Image (tube, rainbow, N blue to C red):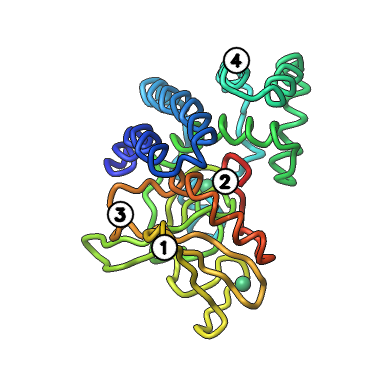
Amino acid sequence: MNVFKQKEREFALQRVDMLRERFPEAGELLSFLKGVLEFQSQVIEELREKDPPFDVSSALSRIDKGKPALRLRGVDWTVYFPLLRRLLDVLSDIGTEEIKTRVEGLAKLSDEEIKGELNSFLESREADEVERLTFLSWLQPVLHTFADRIELNHEKWLKNVCPVCGSKPSVSFLMDTSEWEGVRFLRCSLCLTDWLYERTKCTVCGNNEDDKLSYYTSEEVKHVELQVCNLCNHYIKNVDMRKDGLAVPDVDDVATVALDLWAGEQGYLKVERNLLGL
Ligand SMILES: [Zn+2]
Ligand SMILES: [Zn+2]
């Protein structure tokens, strides 16, 4: 396991507590997120011990051909259904009444019916809010375990979709690495993989003209900026790890929901909603 990522997932839980104090308006969302992250950390740990079979060489040859490493429809997800059933119990415990009711409905489905729902989600990426939250919360740690075994050649990929699962990013971040200064990574909305991307380029339409990209920050949140594309009207958050080295991009994204509300009021669309649908 990539040491930075491993430490970061462990740290994500503590980060939630820090952010809860700093962004009380996002307190309920963050408390709920913490429950999901606890479940996900356990799953990552359990899967790391079990070491489920995974064909790395075919994954790498797909990447070489410019395709994402995993064909999601080709994975036998039923092996992971017990984890999904466990997650449904967790969501029913920590969720709102609305979540509880929908989750109880999902829990009554047979494995065959869940398979059908899952396939249609993987194909269209559309589902009702609670089903989307459920599938993402479950698939993230499982896919993260696969993704972790793939050594990426970052400079070769540079696309706007994830090299591992082909999904869109939900957040991006800037950091210094031992090789590069102030580089930008996109973080996958589905498997949490980070991949290198051009800093001044729209993650939806590829526009890279400086005068057609705008950047917004707020007084209160200095380490998160919005990159808005004036051509396709989409935005993504850039979390600047150089301004706040303790940030966890996908967690800080949830805490700064106020920025999404502002962007929505301006008529901007997010490149991809995060785990909680924001
Ligand atoms: Zn991915
Ligand atoms: Zn664009």
Cβ of disc 4 within 8 Å of ligand 1?
no
Quadrant position of residue 264? bottom right
Q: Which residue is mark 3?
A: 244
Q: Is residue 47 above or below residue 249?
A: above
Instruction: Return the disc, 3 or 4, that comes first in the chain's sequence.
Output: 4
Residue 30's disc number: none
The residue carrying pointer 2 sits among few (fewer than 14), some (14 to 19) or many (20 or more) residues within 10 Å by Cα, namely many
Foreground mark, 1 or 3? Answer: 1
Instruction: Return the disc, 1 or 3, that comes first in the chain's sequence.
Output: 1
Q: Nearer the viewer, residue 156 or 118?
A: 118
Question: What percent of the width, then of the height, locates residue 23?
Answer: 44, 44
Q: Amino acid at mark 3?
A: Asp
Foreground mark, 2 or 1? Answer: 1
Q: Do the residues under discs 1 and 3 have CB atoms within 8 angstroms?
A: no
Residue at 41% in and 20% down: 46
Question: What percent of the width, then of the height, locates residue 218?
Answer: 45, 63
Q: Which residue is mark 2?
A: 274
Residue 219's disc number: 1
Q: In the rendered image, which quarter contains the N terminus?
A: top left
Instruction: Return the disc, 2 or 3, that comes first in the chain's sequence.
Output: 3
Q: Nearer the viewer, residue 184 or 17?
A: 17
Instruction: Return the disc, 2 or 1, that comes first in the chain's sequence.
Output: 1
Q: Which residue is mark 4?
A: 89
